[in-house]
Image: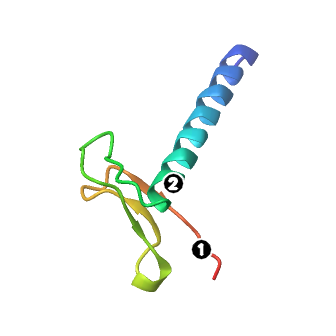
Amino acid sequence: MDEQQFDRLKSVSAKSFNDQKALIKKVLAGRDVACKQCGTFIRVTLPEDKKTTGLFCAKGCTNIALDFVI
């Protein structure tokens, strides 16, 4: 991998990270956000639910695991 490819990878990774961070903020703020792949709403699973915590859509296209500190 040359330097130009590495710089491209860094910028794509940074954009993906920032997009996920914005999505997490919107969902945790209570806004209805649809999955870009299937269109179902993304829901948050909290530690009280005794399941894997994170953000998920109904079909599993969006799957962002989150660690909560209680």
Neighbourhood count class around disc 2 (C-alpha, 10 Å): few under 14, some 14–19, many 20 upward: some
Callout 1 amino acid: Phe
Q: Residue 12, image x and y in percent? A: 59, 28
Asked whether, in this view, residue 5 is left or right of residue 21, the answer is: right
* Label 1 vs label 2, nearer the camera: 2
Q: Residue at x 47, y 71 (%)?
A: 53
Q: Residue 44, image x and y in percent? A: 41, 66
- Residue at numbered disc 1: 68
- Residue at numbered disc 2: 24
Residue 22 sits in which quadrant? Answer: top right
* Residue 13 visible: yes
Asked whether, in this view, residue 61 is left or right of residue 50, the answer is: left
- Dot 1 or dot 2: first in sequence order is 2
Q: Which residue is most to the right? A: 3
Quarter of the image that includes the C terminus = bottom right
Query: Vertical placement of 22 versus 7: above or below?
Result: below
Q: Which residue is drawn at 40% across and 82% down?
A: 49
Camera-nearest residue between 13 and 69? 69
Q: Residue 41, image x and y in percent? A: 29, 54
Q: Residue at x 53, y 40 (%)?
A: 19
Residue 31 sits in which quadrant? Answer: bottom left
- Label 1: which secondary element: loop
Asked whether, in this view, residue 6 is left or right of residue 27, the answer is: right
Asked whether, in this view, residue 38 is left or right of residue 13, the answer is: left
Query: Vertical placement of 11 versus 19: above or below?
Result: above
The answer for how far apart the CA atoms under marks 1 and 2 are is: 13 Å
